[in-house]
Image (spheres, helix red, strand yellow):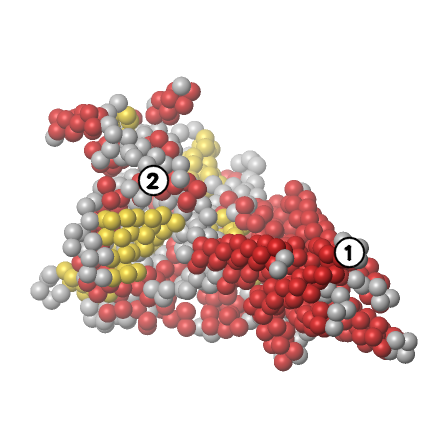
Amino acid sequence: MSVIYLLISISIVVAAVFLYIFIRAVKSGQFDDDYTPSVRILFDDELKKNSNKSEQIRTQIEKQN
Amino acid sequence: MYQVNEQIFMNAQNCFHCGNDIVVADEIIFDEKSFCCAGCKTVYEIFSLNDLTCYYDFENAPGATPQDIKGKYDFLDNEDIVSKLLDFQEDSTHIVSLYIPHIHCSSCIWILENLHKLQKGIAASQVNFHEKKVRITYNPNETNLKDIVLMMSSIGYEPYISLENYENKKKAVDRSLYYKIGVAFFCFGNIMLLSFPEYFEVGEFWIEQYKGFFRWLIFALSLPAFFYSAWGYYVSAWKSIKSRMLNIDIPIALGIVVMFVRSTVDIAFGYGQGFFDSMCGLIFFMLLGKLFQQKTYNFLSFERDYKSYFPIAVTKINADGSEEAIQVYDVKKGNRLLIRNQELIPVDGILISEKTSLDYSFVTGEAEAIEKKSGDKIFAGGKQLGREVEMEVLHSVSQSYLTQLWSNDVFQKRVDQKYKTITDTISRYFTPALLGLAVVSFGYWIFIDVTTAFNVFTAILIVACPCALALTAPFTLGNVLRIVGSRKFYLKNATVIEQLAKVDTIVFDKTGTITTNKKTSITYEGTALTDAELKLLKNTLRGSNHPLSRRLYDYIPNQEKSDTTHFEEIIGKGIFAEIDGNTIKIGSSQFLQHMSENTHKKTKVHIEINGVYKGSYVFNNQYREGLEQLFENLSKNYNLVVLSGDNDGERKILEKMLPQNTTLVFNQKPEQKLAYIENLQKEGKNVMMIGDGLNDAGALAQSNIGISISENVNVFSPACDGILDASQFSKIGFFMKYSKNAMKTIMMSFGLSLLYNVVGLSFAVSGNLSPIVAAIIMPLSTVTIVSFVTIMSNFFARK
């Protein structure tokens, strides 16, 4: 048994795995919206914690009322 | 640093939240930032309190001023209506998709995906930017849809909920083309790699030993592409044979099948390696062309009817005076309804409240509001302006005048209408010629060598498989679709371009199409009038019924009444009147014998008091910019018609302004407009209708191409083949010419691909087509065709 059989079957299997992943990605709707994710990835994970600022605003609002 | 400076500079004049100009008197300064109104400031407060001021970092002044929505969403208390709106419903999870017209920048995405920070109970929210939709998952035990909608409205992201949402037919997304392309590419790539060794074959021992394995593996890999990816072509070819219309899919399907059979035979009998790589490549490229042609504008809808404009629920007043939100379809004759400011009248009825103004621009395109008094009949489709009013229902929704327009046949039959595309026209000649050539060559070779005869016969069908031909139109039209789309002319699909090139008659609606919807302004030029003079003027005008007099009368502020001692109106010229011993002359410059340039571009009313010329009121041109130029250019190549629902008061102006051969038709009801177009078509004309309001809907559907003009493409436009942004009105000429050039490009490219076919055929006829030749010619022709049409269509767009 030559090694060529083994190598070619591996290469086909790898390609088939990629095909499967592609089809799954399409099915889950990943290609339906091609813009929003590109923006979303640029957002920071956590919000800027700026508690004293919001505290400041709160007092300002209270002062007004 | 630069950015910070810029921001401070911006804030000096524009609202920090919404970016509108700030009226100094209303300016509110809060947290060292300027706001144009309390609404904008409140939104800022909400964001600040929740640590969401990042909103302002992505984009300058991204917000919208929240509107007053008191009571508007009371119908969301009604469980039945809510459950119709939900995508998904379970005890602890509800999912709803809301359309939000304001979505326009990255800040919008950010804030809408952080909704859970503003309202407890929202688990997640996800934005689809192109569709302007946000999908919200929430827990109904902790919050409800009404609270969410109110919260979103309070931060300037008011969702748009219409009757269309109620029907909520979920369209299954068809992604099969993607799967087919994926499979075809998988097969194509692997087969190509496995074919390589034999292409470079030099009779080596290694190749000889493994040939069988490689060939059968290739055969196995080609099966998914042949049976799954290409299936659509067999179906289409079969259908076209059955309907006796030779379309391009017949030679394609024939080519693919012959390729497959011949290659299988080749492998089975050990003649060669077959054409599997070419076959899969061809399938892949053609599917790619199909995908490219599918340019869709998710945020636009070309199939809209009144439902996307009508409210989902209205407020009913019960006998005991209590208010209740009911579904629009449940409104019955005799019901009393409460219509708030800016709400739409959903059904025909009688006004009970004292008076109201209705804006029928959505129906007629006419922007001026119409006054209605108690007891007047009011029709569905008008937008109520002013204080809330009560009305009594005369007809239910389905029986109202406006909705009945939709039962006209044209709205149904449209779907089945199928145009013969240019590719199909060509293939009517191509297919018989190809088959003829194959048979003749077969007949010639069979007397010399039977095996060669079969080889030649199949080779011709393989090499002539009109891959390049079939790719030409999709790639050209797909590209053109994108180019005109970037210039704010949005077309429904690629066949519209072909239709556009065939048009010979263009019909324009008047109001809202060649005129703008903005109310015309009146300005005064000349020596300023004193109060006494204004009083004289107003009293003179009261007696006249001329449209210009009426408008001028409304324009001049209220004055004390006094009677005219003498009044004379000379039709088409002006008015002569005497009041308290003063003589007043109002009218055209000829009438006043005052010589001034009286161009038709501007409508002027001249004033003379006591023999002294004072000046003139100028009615600013309400026609769209570039109208005359456009008509002049178009009139060289097209029959032009202006079809108006109004009376012929403006006939004179239009006649002067537009080229001589323009047909002007006035007093057309929606049905008459439709019939007019139908008549033109019976005369063999290819009609393009350009309109805007619902009153054009029938004509738009009847015409070969209906283009709807829209000041704001996100709001309502009737069902049509294309939507043109109003700012691009003067470019219609360019688009028409461009569509013709696109067809020219396609013809040139057809020539080019036929050239390839001739080269390939010369190999085939002489019996020399080897797999490697096919494998080279096929991709080469594809690449040249695709680059040729892309370059050409971009080149024509530059002009």
Q: Quadrant of the C terminus of chain B?
A: top right
**How many C-alpha atoms fall within 10 Å of the one at disc 1: few (<14), some, or many (≥20)?**
few
Q: Is residue B68 above or below residue B81?
A: above
Inspect the image, locate mark 2, and give the three-letter code of the amino acid beneath it.
Trp
Which residue does the image show at 77% across and 69% down from the upper left?
B271
Which residue does the image show at 41% across and 69% down from the upper left?
B405
Circle on res. B204: 1
Q: Is residue B134 above or below residue B444?
A: above
Provide residue B246's location: percent of width, then percent of height.
68, 74
Q: Is residue B731 above or below residue B420?
A: above
Circle on res. B18: none
Provide residue B370's location: percent of width, then percent of height.
33, 54
Provide residue B571's location: percent of width, then percent of height.
48, 52
Name the residue furthest right: B448
Name the residue furthest bottom: B242
Determine whether, in the image, residue B93 is placed left or right of residue B15. left
Circle on res. B110: 2
Letter of the chain that mark 1 sits on in the rendering = B
Mark 1 or mark 2: name the one nearer the start of the chain: 2
Give the structural element (helix, strand or loop) at label 2: helix
Are the residues tagged 1 and 2 within 8 Å (C-beta)? Answer: no
**How many C-alpha atoms fall within 10 Å of the one at disc 2: few (<14), some, or many (≥20)?**
many
Give the structural element (helix, strand or loop) at label 1: loop
Q: Is residue B141 above or below residue A63?
A: below
Provide residue B637's location: percent of width, then percent of height.
68, 55
Determine whether, in the image, residue A23 is placed left or right of residue B187. left
Inspect the image, locate mark 1, and give the three-letter code of the amino acid beneath it.
Glu
- Give B730 or B276, whichever is nearer the viewer: B276
